[in-house]
Amino acid sequence: MLRLCAALRTATIFVSVLGLCSGISQLAHAGASPQNQDRSYHRLGQKPNPRVKMVVEKRGTIVVELYQKECPKTTAHFLSLVNRKFYDRTLFHNVVRGFMATAGDPKSKTVDGAKIATLSSYDVATRYGLGGGGSGKTVPLEPHAGHDKGTIGLQHGARSIDSGDSQFFFNLDDNHTNDGAYTVFGKITQGINVMDNIKQGDRILTIRVVPLAQ
């Protein structure tokens, strides 16, 4: 009988210890939960990257997400030009299949795109003076991302990597040999098929900032 009572006391103590451990575990979990919720809240509450919508005549619409955190100066400069409607009616004046499609020269607004469609970049430059125009304000190199297909980069002059202005390019394929040499400041999130169909001489009708709610 004494042995039975001792065994019952031991079992009761064991169960109590288990209950205490379980309670501590629940308290610890409950204490950690708000922190996890806070972290999730902050992740969800992060301000999204700005996006722009580009309408290319006879091709369609492209939406580009900009790398504002990684390339703040380039993004701010590009958005300032977009807000001024600087890019409206500019041409893709240089398109090399499997490489890149370049646009953003304001001089191209008055050029008939059909007339440069089959010309070399040299002829486009010498006959129509395209490839050297800009807004007059430059930004320094911010080389933080790779040249993956569908990314957008900022063109710069041959003499200085810190001379990027209004001219930009889409990487029509992976072009990692250019990594570090140009600022990649965004990527296409919608309309990659439109980019694939861009031809030299195609005209950008508009570029507009996409409201955050959309």
Image (tube, helix red, strand yellow):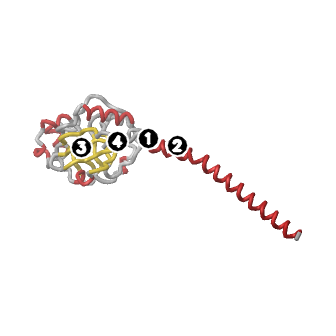
Q: In the orientation shown, which residue stands out farthest toward the top?
A: 136
**How far across and down, in percent of the image, does residue 111 sit?**
12, 38
The numbered mark at residue 54 is 3
Which of the 4 image quarters holds residue 77? top left
At 31% from the left and 37% from the top, the residue drawn is 156
**Disc 3 or 1, which lies upstream in sequence?**
1
Q: Check disc 2 and report the residue beneath it.
A: 38
Q: Check disc 4 and report the residue beneath it.
A: 66
**Disc 3 or 4, which lies upstream in sequence?**
3
Q: Check disc 1 and report the residue beneath it.
A: 46
**How far across and down, in percent of the image, does residue 150 sit?**
31, 50
Give, as a three-letter code, the residue at label 4. Leu
| Camera-side mark, 3 or 2 | 2
Give, as a three-letter code, the residue at label 2. Asp
The CA span between labels 4 and 1 is 15 Å
**Disc 3 or 2, which lies upstream in sequence?**
2
As helix, strand or loop, the secondary structure at mark 1 comes to loop
As helix, strand or loop, the secondary structure at mark 3 comes to strand
**How far across and down, in percent of the image, does residue 34 sit?**
56, 45
As helix, strand or loop, the secondary structure at mark 4 comes to strand
Q: Nearer the viewer, residue 66 or 210?
A: 210
Give, as a three-letter code, the residue at label 1. Gln
Which of the 4 image quarters holds residue 64? top left
Q: Please count the marks in the image.
A: 4
The numbered mark at residue 193 is none
Mark 2 Cα-neighbour bin, 10 Å: few <14, some 14–19, many ≥20: few
The CA span between labels 3 and 1 is 25 Å
Q: Are marks 3 and 1 in contact (CB under 8 Å)?
A: no
At 39% from the left and 35% from the top, the residue drawn is 72
The CA span between labels 4 and 2 is 27 Å
